[in-house]
Image (cartoon, helix red, strand yellow):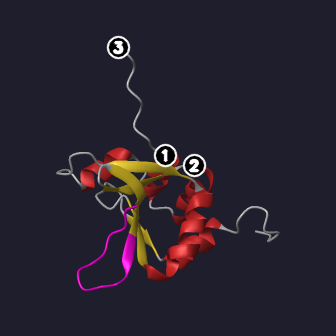
Amino acid sequence: MTESTPEPRSEALADALAKQDVASVAYALRNDVIVVPQLVVDGKAGQVRVFGREGSEKRMLLLFSSAENYVRMVPDEPDPQVMICDAQWLREFLTVHGSVLEMVFFDIAGPHVMQAAPADLLAALGPLPGTGATS
């Protein structure tokens, strides 16, 4: 019997969310991993799963400190899928899709929910490495 793989998680992000500390959340996002829901179509998880309110064309990006917190949000889903991303991925995603995102939520099912406007989150992440911009 093999050991089970530990659930993907970011202790740094979980701790920052527990403190409701914006600067610590930004630090965790820049220096650790982020758990991102994947949309499963025909049994394949191929893209980021975003959520929207009925009647709105805008979408919400939900990010999690752990796969367990995502599962808590979708308890009836038979096989919830996530991917593990980093700050560079998040910068690129927000740059490409920021215009259709209304808000970004962290650990929306709890225990410590926070939210940020996509532009504010992008600013908190800082410039892409190698762009020559200074922090």
Amino acid of disc 1: Ser
- Mark 1–mark 2 CB contact (< 8 Å): yes
Amino acid of disc 2: Asp
The residue at the point 23 percent across, 54 percent down is: 74
Find the magenta span and give its range.
Answer: 48-60
The residue at the point 78 percent across, 68 percent down is: 131
The secondary structure making up most of the magenta span is loop
Circle 2 SS class? loop
* Residue 106, image quadrant: bottom left
Q: Earlier in the sequence, mark 1 or mark 3?
A: 3
Question: Horizontal placement of 95 versus 76: left or right?
Answer: right
Kindly identify which residue carries mark 2.
32
Quadrant of the drawing holding the C terminus? bottom right
Task: Tell me the CA gap for discs 3 and 2.
Answer: 30 Å
Quadrant of the drawing holding the N terminus? top left
The residue at the point 62 percent across, 51 percent down is: 31
Residue 59: x %, y % from top left: 37, 76
Task: Tell me the CA gap for discs 1 and 2.
Answer: 6 Å
Question: Horizontal placement of 71 versus 7: left or right?
Answer: left
- Mark 1–mark 3 CB contact (< 8 Å): no
Any magenta on residue 46? no
Amino acid of disc 3: Met
Kindly identify which residue carries mark 3.
1
Q: Earlier in the sequence, mark 3 or mark 2?
A: 3
Question: Horizontal placement of 76 versus 80: left or right?
Answer: left
Residue extending farthest top: 1
Residue 80: x %, y % from top left: 29, 49
Kindly identify which residue carries mark 1.
10
Circle 3 SS class? loop
